Image (cartoon, rainbow, N blue to C red):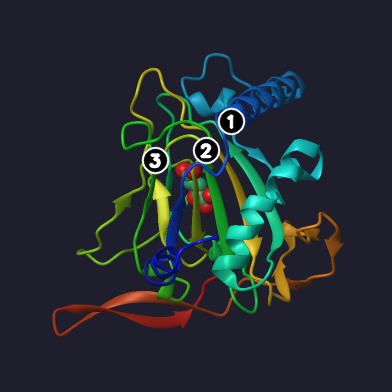
Amino acid sequence: MLSNKQKHQFDTEGYLVVSDLFNKEEINFYRTHFETMRQEQNAQRDDIDPASNDPLVQYPRIMQPHRRDEASLKWVIDKRINAVLVDLLGREPFVAQTMFYFKPAGARGQAMHQDQYFLRVQPGTCIAAWMAVDDCDESNGCLRVLPGSHTWPLLCTTDADNAISFTDVTVELPDDATLVPVQMHAGDVLFFNGQLVHGSLPNTTTDRFRRALIGHYLVGEAEKVHQWYHPVLQMNGQPIEMGLSERGGECGTWVSMDNEKHLEMRPEIVD
Ligand SMILES: O=C(O)CCC(=O)C(=O)O
């Protein structure tokens, strides 16, 4: 299904956009479906401050919808996504997570990070399928990636700037790191390696959403994942036994040597 050029890009840069994997009707369905889910969830909440000027109070991301919602489950195991993942990885992956981000006008983004920091897949890593549910570009806070960073080990984390990120951890990058904004059309899917450094800036528009439906998968050789991601599913939707992995071990930190930055490994501090 994928060309050698596409596979080469994924292998060398750590990410690949597959255009038009889902069609307009499907995208319209997901917009309506997750808006309905949001309204139903908000109606159950008693922690919404109506005076808050943080758009994410009314539009939090929806976590793990596939565990309770048939349409989300069908999406995350969709044959088209599976075919791309098999092409890229050489075998079927396992499903660990789904998320839906609304990112309305004015909402903060998510600081630069590696997904493997959260999933702790062993052996191997995770892989994401990030589907644009709106056209996205720099003004509404598209994803930004650091090509080639998927070859790095897990990086040590530091505090993120909560004025621009709704999550509170980030990673340090060398001064010459050039982040690439990934502009996409609704229905395109970005696949990226779990070690790839990525994140997004705020949505600076006054009138556009930047919605995304996201699946996180474990590579097929995985034996363990962090407890938050259990139960793990096969691509036929059936659960599979998976061991528990822990935080800890080593992480990479940048040190200067001969005027160049190098990664030095040190024990990870786990709180
Ligand atoms: O959509 C975003 O802004 C961030 C999503 C992300 O980091 C992820 O799916 O791992």
Locate residue 205: give its quadrant. Answer: top left
Nearer the camera: disc 3 or disc 1: 1
Q: Which residue is mark 2?
A: 187
Residue at 79% in and 70% down: 242
Residue 69 visible in the shown view: no
Residue type of the residue flagged with mark 3: Cys
* Disc 2 secondary structure class: loop
Residue at 45% in and 76% down: 153
**In this view of the protein, which residue sits in the foreground, 4 or 82?**
4
Q: Which residue is mark 1?
A: 27
Q: Position of residue 2 (x, y in %)?
A: 50, 61
Q: Position of residue 180 (x, y in %)?
A: 30, 53
Residue type of the residue flagged with mark 2: Gly
Residue type of the residue flagged with mark 1: Ile
Residue at 38% in and 68% down: 149
Circle on res. 142: 3
